[in-house]
Image: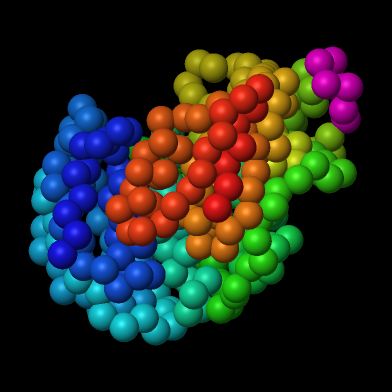
Amino acid sequence: MLTIDGGQFEGGGQIVRMAVSLSALTGTPVRITRVRARRDTPGLAAQHVAAIRAVSSFCDPQTTGVSVGSSVLTFIPSSLRRSESIIDVGTAGSIPLVLQAWLPVALKKGGSITIRGGTEVRHSPTIDYLERVFLPPLRTHGARVKISIEQRGYYPQGGGVVRVTAEPSEPTPLHLRSEEAENGIISCSSNLPDHVTVRQAESARKRLSDILGIDPPQYLDRRSGLSTGSSCTAWRGMKGGIALGSRGLPAEEVGQKAADMLIDEVKAGGMVDRYLADQMLLYLARYHGSYTVSELSLHTRTMQWLLSQFGYRVQISEGDVVEVSS
């Protein structure tokens, strides 16, 4: 059994989610110790339990320690099969982060998942970043994935609902290179006046126009639901910027924050942003290819280390930009 120290490098939930996914993909039993040791509240949270359950639906594993607060868990997978599952995080825990664990296995065997939780929450990509920045390069290289955002969910109530389907796919090598970069802004809200989404989007558009000289199309998504909140996601090619609304924060500042995050990534260089670099690393290791990023984040270094534990080798060459290849 492979033992993974969950306190290494980034020392958070990324190690848990991706170790369980890699365990299922490779058939390697794992024991994860010191789960989320570097977090203020160590141990599994509801979102991580949901991610493990999502992966478990493919392989009926033997498990121990899969409960909120657990600091040690084991995961012994059986043979993979197609999965159709429904997962309720039970909180506003991040749906996109649950999908990070689920998708690599889904591309191997196919399946669908309906998840209830948070679509746009702190310390997580928004569901729109997942759809507009993360998935397009995978689809371009042959991954067959569809996503439907049925309801949005914000902290603390959650209540978002997302359905994803994936067909068995064998993507071609992910040589991510410069192409005509699509760009856009999506401004979303739940249980808020219509003008909130308009102000967020227009603020982001003006900022991107003034600094980058682009005039992205704007998409507005206004809904009602269990939770109240707003978000703005801006993207250009394989780079994105996100911001969440909060009580007392003007809508214009939300849009500007999303735009500024994108502007920083565009100016920094490289083909992918620092967040996509670590999210894409597992797929690079499995399907080969290369991409460049402005710098290595701690999350990327964590993924490089974790992949090496399962026998995957990722090469990193640091210069004016960092080239990552496999």
**Residue 88 appearing in the image:** no
Side of 102 relative to 52 (left or right): right
Q: Is residue 133 left or right of residue 104?
A: right
Query: Considering depth in this image, is 25 or 50 the residue closer to the camera?
Result: 25
For the point 62% across and 25% down, the residue is 319
Image quadrant in which you'd find residue 86: bottom left
Is residue 165 one of those drawn in magenta? no
- Residue 151 image point, x, y percent: 54, 55
At a point 14% along the width and 47% down the height, the residue shown is: 33
Q: Is residue 271 visible?
A: yes
Q: Is residue 111 above or below residue 51?
A: below
**What is the quadrant of the N terminus in the image?**
bottom left
Residue toward you, 157 or 181: 181
Residue 186 image position (x, y, % from top left): 70, 40
* Direction from residue 263 to residue 94 in the image, left or right: left
Judged left or right of residue 142, residue 314 is left
Tell me which segment is drawn in magenta: 209-215
Q: Position of residue 58 (x, y in %)?
A: 36, 76
Q: Could you tell me how many numbered marks the image carries? A: 0
Q: Is residue 161 above or below residue 244?
A: below
Q: Position of residue 88 (x, y in %)?
A: 34, 61
Q: Nearer the viewer, residue 229 or 106?
A: 106
Compared to residue 145, the image places residue 212 above or below, namely: above
Residue 61, quarter of the rendered image: bottom left
Residue 100 lies in what quarter of the image?
bottom left
Please name the residue shown 88% across and 22% down the image: 213
x 51%, y 44%: residue: 315
In the rendered image of this protein, does residue 233 appear above or below residue 160?
above
Colour mode of the rendering = rainbow
